[in-house]
């Protein structure tokens, strides 16, 4: 069985977890436990999180900005987009290298038929108030 696993592992198209090819996130395999026949899944980073950011050697994510942010910063509105500073999350659920970094993540409220606004003590997507 061990020899069979080694032979099948030769069918892997990739040997990493995640990385960037420009602003395309490349995810290797379907999940962390997949060992054989791993294929590359290409995920274009699209607005409002249009930048692919590599975090450490094996992790990457789509973010709003390439620069890390300071976790705990209050969310803000940029037009109808909510910008929040979120801890790094691997696309395949691994924490791995760089898990202590945070990056700006954006949510386009207009795509949800909402607007960016205050909801209590925080900023989020809220229903538009009609005049």
Image (cartoon, rainbow, N blue to C red):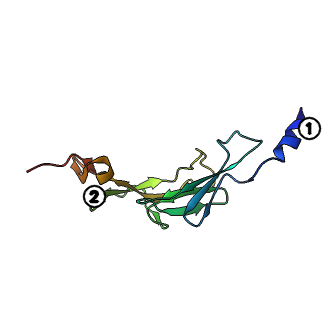
Labelled disc at residue 58: none
Q: Residue at x 59, y 48 (%)?
A: 95
Q: From this view, report whether residue 38 is shown above or below residue 82.
A: above
Q: Residue furthest top?
A: 1
Marks 2/1: CA distance? 55 Å
In the displayed structure image, the side of residue 64 where residue 17 appears, left or right: right
In the displayed structure image, the side of residue 118 where residue 88 appears, left or right: right
Mark 2 / mark 1, whichever is N-terminal = 1
Whole-percent x, y for residue 26 in the image: 62, 56
- Please name the residue that numbered disc 1 is placed on: 3
Tell me the crowding category of disc 2: few under 14, some 14 to 19, or many 20 or more residues within 10 angstroms, Cα based: some
Any part of residue 101 in sight: no
Whole-percent x, y for residue 129 in the image: 14, 48
Q: Secondary structure at mark 2?
A: loop
Q: Residue at x 54, y 62 (%)?
A: 52
**Quadrant containing the N terminus in the rendered view:** top right
Q: From this view, report whether residue 2 is shown above or below residue 121.
A: above
The answer to which of 78 and 118 lies nearer the viewer is: 78
Whole-percent x, y for residue 88 in the image: 52, 53
In the displayed structure image, the side of residue 41 where residue 74 appears, left or right: left
Whole-percent x, y for residue 49 in the image: 44, 59
How many circles with numbers are drawn on the protein?
2
Q: Secondary structure at mark 1?
A: helix
The answer to which of 116 and 8 lies nearer the viewer is: 8
Q: From this view, report whether residue 5 is shown above or below residue 91.
A: above
Any part of residue 29 in sight: yes
Tell me the crowding category of disc 1: few under 14, some 14 to 19, or many 20 or more residues within 10 angstroms, Cα based: few
Q: Residue at x 71, y 40 (%)?
A: 34
- Please name the residue that numbered disc 2 is placed on: 80
């Amino acid at each position: 069985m061990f020899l069979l696993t080694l032979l099948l592992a030769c069918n892997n198209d990739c040997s990493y977890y995640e990385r960037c090819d420009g602003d395309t996130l490349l995810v290797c395999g379907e999940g962390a436990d997949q060992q054989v026949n791993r294929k590359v899944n290409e995920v274009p980073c699209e607005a409002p999180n249009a930048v692919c950011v590599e975090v450490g050697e094996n992790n990457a994510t789509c973010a709003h900005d390439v620069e890390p942010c300071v976790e705990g910063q209050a969310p803000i509105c940029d037009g109808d987009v909510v910008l929040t500073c979120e801890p790094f999350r691997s696309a395949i659920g691994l924490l791995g290298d760089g898990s202590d970094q945070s990056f700006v993540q954006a949510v386009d409220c207009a795509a949800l038929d909402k607007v960016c606004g205050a909801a209590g003590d925080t900023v989020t997507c809220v229903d538009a108030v009609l005049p």
